[in-house]
């Protein structure tokens, strides 16, 4: 069974968001417009369905008339151990561009490293990794 995926309805910024997330996570983007889907509840050039495929998969669309754009409280998307520590740190920095670092990515008393960042679209990300592998230990020594 595949893991759940994030699907954001944005207020007219879906194409921009797909480019942003591709810049952060890499991967490929596929997008379809309202016109292609024969939707009349928004501009024809609006994104009816967009997909980022790669290390992180997510879906993005422009909210049509009557659809509520994304907002969240008390929700965090966790990318804990989803990649090598170097990659996770790069993602953290990328997501912070135009966004806000909520809690610096740092080594914790229990030995793992994590941090929180809210990106420019309002998504709160928890990024972290366990130490103990050679790669993680090397990454930690550069953080300290």
Image (cartoon, rainbow, N blue to C red):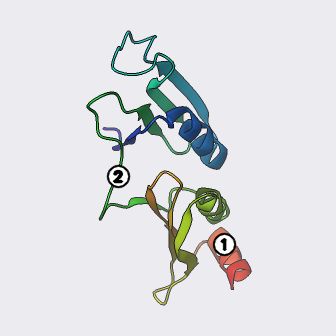
State the residue at coordinates (51%, 78%).
Answer: 112
Residue at the far right in the pictured view: 142
Q: Nearer the viewer, residue 52 or 68?
A: 68
Location of the N terminus (image quadrant)? top left
* Foreground: disc 1 or disc 2: 2
The answer to whether residue 130 shows anywhere in this view is no
Q: Which residue is tagged 2?
A: 71
Residue at far left of view: 66
- Counting other residues with Cα less than 10 Å from the Cα at mark 1, is it few (<14), some (14-19), or many (20 or more)? few
Q: Is residue 18 above or below residue 121?
A: above
When asked about the image quadrant of residue 99, the answer is bottom right
Identified at 55% across, 44% down, the residue is 55
In the picture of the structure, the residue carrying the numbered disc 1 is 134
Horizontal and vertical percent position of residue 17 = 54, 41
Q: Is residue 49 visible in this depiction of the protein?
A: yes
* Residues at marks 1 and 2, CA–CA distance in whole angstroms: 39 Å
139 lies left or right of 119: right
Residue 36, quarter of the rendered image: top left
């Amino acid at each position: 069974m595949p893991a759940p995926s994030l699907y954001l309805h944005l207020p007219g910024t879906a194409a921009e968001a797909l480019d942003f997330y591709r810049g952060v996570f890499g991967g490929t983007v596929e997008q379809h417009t309202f016109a292609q889907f024969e939707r009349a509840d928004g501009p024809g050039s609006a994104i009816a369905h967009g997909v980022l495929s790669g290390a992180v998969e997510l879906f993005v669309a422009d909210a049509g008339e009557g659809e509520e754009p994304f907002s969240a409280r008390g929700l965090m998307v966790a990318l804990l151990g989803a990649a090598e520590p170097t990659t996770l740190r790069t993602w953290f920095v990328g997501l912070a561009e135009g966004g806000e670092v909520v809690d610096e990515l740092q080594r914790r008393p229990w030995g793992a490293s994590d941090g929180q960042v809210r990106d420019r679209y309002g998504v709160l990300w928890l990024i972290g990794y366990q130490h103990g592998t050679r790669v993680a230990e090397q990454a930690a020594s550069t953080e300290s």
